[in-house]
Amino acid sequence: MEKRVIKKDALAGIVQKLAEDTLVYAPVQEEDQVLFKALKQGMAPLIDFANAKNAPKNFFFPQTETMLKFFRSERGRELSEVVEGSPEAILFGVRPCDARSFVLLDAVFNDPTYKDPYYIERREKTTIVSLGCVNPPYTTCFCTSVGGHPLSSEGADVMLTEMEEGYLAEFLTEKGEKLLARLGDLSAADQGLDEKKKEISAAAEGKIKSHIPGKEIKPWLDENFEHPFWDTIHKSCLACGTCTYLCPTCHCFDITDEVKGDGGQRIRSWDSCMSWLFTMETSGHNPRPSQKERWRQRLMHKFRYFVDRYGAIACVGCGRCVMYCPVNIDIRKIVTDISKQ
């Protein structure tokens, strides 16, 4: 694995240089929010930031996308146009929790049985540059409780760790090494930086103050689908779906055909298990008729069903759902309360 050192005052300029001939997504300031956006000429990426409000999953799994276009003919519906593929891209400044979410989403969209060509193409053409959390972005972060770490390189092609000497850049994959060739003349990292990184990593883990029994509650979930506890967690929920739309790992979607005249297109859009329409059947029956059943599904999916199928919790501990829930529903408290049942 190649390792280099990037000077702190040079990193933003290097990213801007890459954006001159490559599509680069990076965190940028937009009014009072930090959002991942495509860098345009003259735009500088944020280097010193907490985390973006929007999880970067939407670059591989867009909120809305056209899957195909068709037209009506005497023979029925026929494909009229192949949707253009995605370009090569760089996703810069991804925090380790969000980079780890890509690994979890890979399990869903690149399953041996069901492969999603739209998602897979974007993943294969995008290089992920992750920026370690030497200091936890927020007090709501709990990545260490769900299998993550503030300096985890899981899901990254290039891992950047801030040090006194600059950013230690580790080129982890073939895509990462390909990017190294475009970064100019960078100093080689000496072995002493590896020891410093271990110290920084241990310190960063110690700074995570929010902990939940994320791995411990599954046995209770396995046995208590009808437990009275489920009557207690949903009452203040507005069903707005903020938690699911901001979640780096939520991946439910709906597919609709939009038709105008003899032409049309098939659209895929994000959906939310918090919505009453999500499980509404054509007959009018809804197997999850109230928010109680929807919240139970959300918890069960993340901490039981996903574990059964893929061997990991479908939560990366980013804390977005905690920070942005309009009625202060806190998944950390719910998981902790379950552990006390």
Image: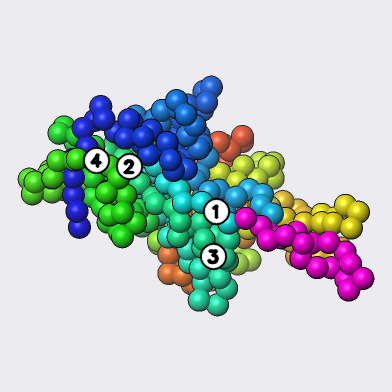
Residue behind mark 3: 109
Question: Where in the figure is residue 297, as x and y percent of width and height?
Answer: 62, 60
Discs 2/4, front: 4
The answer to whether residue 200 is above or below residue 116 is above
The residue lying toward the viewer, choosing from 168 and 220, is: 168
Q: Is residue 220 a member of the stretch shown in magenta?
A: no
Kindly identify the amino acid type of the residue bearing the numbered disc 2.
Answer: Leu
Residue at horizontal 33 percent and vertical 42 percent from the top: 131
Residue behind mark 2: 131
Kindly identify the amino acid type of the residue bearing the numbered disc 3.
Answer: Phe
For marks 1 and 4 on the same chain, the one whose residue lies earlier in the sequence: 1
Give the magenta part as a residue range. Answer: 67-84
The chief SS type of the magenta part is: strand
Discs 3/4, front: 4
Tag 4: Cα neighbours inside 10 Å, few (<14), some, or many (≥20)?
Answer: few
Residue at horizontal 65 percent and vertical 45 percent from the top: 241
Discs 1/2, front: 1
Q: Distance between the residues labelled 1 and 2?
A: 24 Å
Q: Residue 86 carries which label?
A: 1
Farthest bottom residue in view: 113
Residue behind mark 4: 184
Question: Where in the figure is residue 238, as x and y percent of width and height?
Answer: 69, 41
User: Is the Cβ of the residue at disc 1 closer than 8 Å to that at disc 4?
Assistant: no
Farthest front residue in view: 21
Question: Where in the figure is residue 245, as x and y percent of width and height?
Answer: 60, 46
